[in-house]
DNA sequence: TTGAAAGCGCTACCAT
DNA sequence: ATGGTAGCGCTTTCAA
């Protein structure tokens, strides 16, 4: 106010009408100039006057007003990545976002936190997004999908383990990961297989299907599965290792490579040899695992690239006729190294 | 309706006027009922009629129209977490989002990808957010801050290494990390110190200031610093290890714990003893490091919690008078384990 | 207790 | 080449 050049908060925010007034033209002209509307010719002097006025006022168009008028948005709602779901998944989401931005969509993360599926769908629908990509964690129901479509969403895509009627589904079958791990262990002669269950909340989405797959594969091969709850901390790992020999296991699938590193260290500290006494296999194929001694066997997961999914979204937005389909998002294969 | 509930795309999206028509009341009444407006009494039968009509049509209010009318939003713009900036930073961002959501803000990630600071500020301003939290990576200038404030943003907060005039700044001085690491090594008698420089793009934001801090600390102690470019892959690490003895270093600061694990394995494969021949210190204090042999010394980083930052944002939004200040976001201290 | 109507900021049609 | 104006969906006086 006094001597600071920042009369920021006091004056109200400039509108196109303010620009028009300052430039001595109509609001229409301002709109034409600022949007470079092709269907209309505006003289160069006028253009300059308008631009200067806009500049001087620090005018910035109001996106909500614009899309209200336009009747549609370029907004894609994505769920906030809340889970510690591993670098793979994180990278996939980052890719997806980047690709969508490149296709000129505005990616919005809007909290589904503490909302159930239908409530979340409703609050998304309020934004009138042109597309929604929902993580499996949000229990999107067919009704939720319908609400979104009724609100104008042209593409509704789910990402997760279940399919949802009415939506394009990218199914990530985590059971496959557990199944591959156990199949690998069985092939190498193991029959008593522990499966590490992380205790971090939110990870059940992944760990439950993984152990289910493990059970299925074990049943098919006549092997035994034992669930081993384990928080990602050193002491519980040591405790588990201390009673390891009583468990009578000859192999363990550790949910992922991080847990494998945790458990391997503890086992080795107990003098348990890997793989002779106990075989260890992780999942995710992180570089980290390759750096262990012995080098960690793992289940490599191929995720569809985020770009691919972005392209699907874009296609469905442009051509909403397309029948909702179920796509496979994931491939899994065991990678043999030294720990099995 | 009949038996397929999916008359989705064909009918246009219902507005409050549609609800009013179906319920046989005015739009005003619909608004009163659906918002539970306290200052107005609506009879119970009317309320029910309105609610049923809304339900039947699948009516969802239009957020843009509402905020246009209201003249303000509850939107907070956050940059998309684009960088592989480590789990610490990721967790901080996730916390921040969750806390903001709990305070009833709508968190929006809006791509600053490929935009320079002022362009990004402008595109954010179009959304008329009530607050903006900008990562240091976006070169937000005082002018950008001004644009945002003129557009109605009540809080502009930056997060990064530099401070920006006009904004509340949370400064994360990465130099401190490098300085602590080197000081620790110097204390333990080392004088020829390598500093690993990741080659992943985007990480310079962190690695450059870290080595700068390392240089400063080394200069103060009469030690030598040698930059060691290293991509996060096994072969380059092996190559670096192969020429390690020619480098004449007695210690290395590896940027973070992940790179430490990578390099330690390679050094050990060359028969180089840690810490006798070469001391190794990482940063971030991941559990991973504690699991190594020898257990990895590291620089522990204390980040302000996301909740704290969310509270500041909220306070400034409610009380925009508050003077922009510079806060310290980070504390760093060396943790001695076995590798140094 | 309810309705009519103004107007938020913007764009696109139709005049001039 | 430029201006007038309707109207996107919503909330909120003001009247009835």
Image: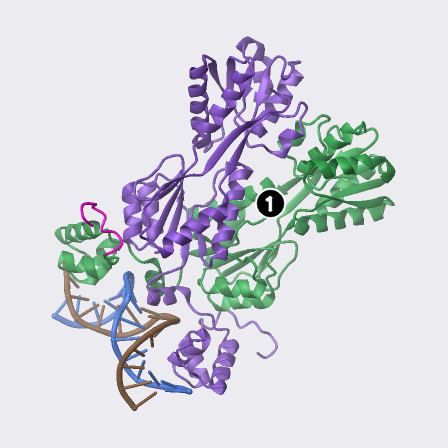
Chain colours: A green, B purple, C blue, D brown
Total tally of numbered discs in the picture: 1
Q: Quadrant of the N terminus of chain B?
A: bottom right
Residue B56 coordinates in the image, percent (x, y): 52, 78
Q: Is A34 within the magenta?
A: no
Would you say residue A4 sits in the magenta stretch?
yes
The dominant secondary structure in magenta is loop
Q: Residue at x 63, y 41 (%)?
A: A302
Which percent across, then down, holds residue A257?
68, 36
B286 vs B246: above or below: below
The reply to whether residue B15 is in sight is yes
Q: Quadrant of residue A182?
A: top right
Magenta-highlighted residues: A1-10
Quarter holding residue A271: top right
- Residue B8 lies, in percent from the top left, at 52, 70
Circle 1 — which element?
loop
Q: Nearer the viewer, residue B33 or A161?
A: B33
Residue sitting at x 28%, y 49%: B147
Compared to residue A23, the image places residue B305 above or below, namely above
The answer to whether residue A98 is left or right of residue B169 is right
Q: Which residue is mark 1?
A: A84
Q: Position of residue A319 (x, y in %)?
A: 48, 59
D8 to the left or right of A327: left
Q: Is residue B85 visible?
A: no
Q: Is residue A20 left or right of residue B203?
A: left
In the picture, the quarter occupied by the C terminus of chain B is top right
């Amino acid at each position: 106010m006094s001597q600071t050049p920042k009369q920021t908060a006091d004056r109200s925010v400039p509108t196109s009408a303010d620009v028009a007034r300052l430039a001595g033209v109509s609001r229409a002209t301002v709109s034409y100039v600022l949007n470079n509307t092709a269907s209309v010719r505006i003289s160069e002097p006028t253009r300059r006057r308008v631009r200067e006025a806009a500049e001087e006022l620090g005018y910035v168009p109001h996106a909500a007003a614009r899309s209200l008028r336009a009747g549609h948005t370029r907004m894609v709602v994505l769920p906030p990545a809340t889970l510690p779901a591993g670098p793979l998944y994180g990278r996939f989401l980052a890719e997806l976002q980047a690709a969508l931005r490149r296709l000129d969509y505005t990616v919005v993360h809007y909290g589904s936190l503490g909302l159930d599926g239908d409530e979340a769908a409703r609050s998304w629908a309020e934004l009138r997004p042109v597309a929604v990509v929902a993580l499996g964690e949000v229990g999107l129901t067919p009704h939720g999908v319908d609400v979104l479509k009724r609100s104008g969403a042209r593409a509704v895509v789910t990402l997760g383990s279940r399919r949802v009627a009415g939506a394009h589904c990218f199914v990530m079958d985590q059971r496959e990961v557990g199944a591959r791990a156990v199949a690998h262990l069985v092939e190498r002669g193991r029959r008593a297989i522990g499966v590490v269950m992380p205790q971090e909340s939110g990870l059940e989405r992944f760990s439950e299907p993984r152990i289910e797959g493990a059970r299925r594969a074990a049943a098919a091969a006549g092997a035994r599965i034992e669930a081993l709850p384990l928080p990602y901390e050193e002491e519980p790992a040591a405790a588990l290792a201390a009673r390891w020999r009583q468990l009578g296991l000859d192999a363990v699938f550790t949910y992922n490579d991080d847990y494998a590193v945790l458990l391997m260290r503890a086992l080795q500290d107990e003098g348990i040899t890997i793989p002779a006494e106990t075989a260890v296999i992780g999942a995710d194929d992180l570089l980290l695992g390759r750096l262990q001694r012995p080098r960690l066997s793992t289940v490599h997961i191929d995720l569809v690239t985020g770009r691919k999914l972005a392209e699907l979204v874009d296609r469905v937005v442009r051509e909403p006729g397309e029948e909702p389909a179920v796509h496979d998002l994931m491939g899994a294969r065991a990678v043999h190294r030294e720990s099995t």
